[in-house]
Image (cartoon, rainbow, N blue to C red):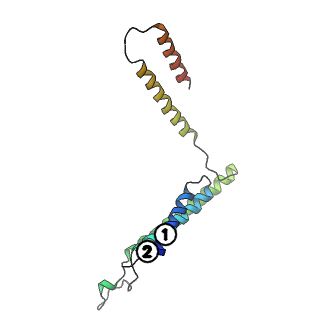
Amino acid sequence: MTVSLSLLVTAGVLCAVGGVLLLMRALSRILIGAVILGNGINLLMLSASGAAGAAPLLYPGVELSRVTDPLPQAIALTAIVITLATTAFLLAMAYRTLRVTGTDEVQDDIEDRRVALRAEVQEQRAALRERQAPRGHRPEGDRAAYRSERRRLRTV
C-alpha cells in the first residue's frame, strides 16, 4: 500500500483551512469552511484507503488481493451527501440571517451571557460565604460588610 505524500499534505491543508474558516463569525465563511473541510476529509479518507486496484466485482478468476476495497468509496460518497445537505442548510440560514438582520454575522446569545454572569456571581457568593464561614463572635462591622456585599451580588 502506497500513500501519496502530496495527497496527505493537501488533505491536511484543506482540513486546516476549513477548520479556521469554521471558527469565523460570518456565516458565509462558515459555509465555505464546511465545504472545504468536507472535501479535505474526503480526500484524506480516499488517500488513506490505499492504491487503486481492480474493480470490486467478484466473478470467477479474480484475485481478491488485487480488488479495491469499496468501503472507503462508499463512506466518501455518504460524506459528500452529508456535506451537500449541511451546505444547503447553512446557505439557507445565511440567506435568512442576511434578509432579517442585514448582515450574515453571528451575534452572541443573550441567554449565554446571562448564564455565564449567573455562574460568576454564584462563585463570588460562595467565596463570600467561605470568608464568613467560621461561626463565632464577629464584630458588627464584619456582618454589615457581608450583608452589603451580598446585596450587591444579588442586584448583579
Residue type at mark 1 is Ala
Q: Nearer the viewer, residue 107 or 153?
A: 153
Q: Are marks 2 and 1 in contact (CB under 8 Å)?
A: yes
Q: What residue is shown at x 44% (from left), y 77% (from top)?
A: 4
Q: Quadrant of residue 109?
A: top right
Asked whether the viewer can see residue 83, the reply is: no
Q: Secondary structure at mark 1?
A: helix
Q: Nearer the viewer, residue 80 or 54?
A: 54
Which of the image's four quarters has the N terminus? bottom left
Check disc 1 and report the residue beneath it: 11
Check disc 2 and report the residue beneath it: 47
Q: Secondary structure at mark 2?
A: helix
Q: Quadrant of residue 136?
A: top left
| Residue 61 place in picture, x, y as percent | 29, 92
| Residue 2 place in picture, x, y as percent | 39, 79
Q: Is residue 61 above or below residue 14?
A: below
Residue type at mark 2 is Ser
Q: Nearer the viewer, residue 115 or 138?
A: 138
Q: Is residue 121 above or below residue 107?
A: above
Q: What residue is shown at x 45% (from left), y 7% (from top)?
A: 139
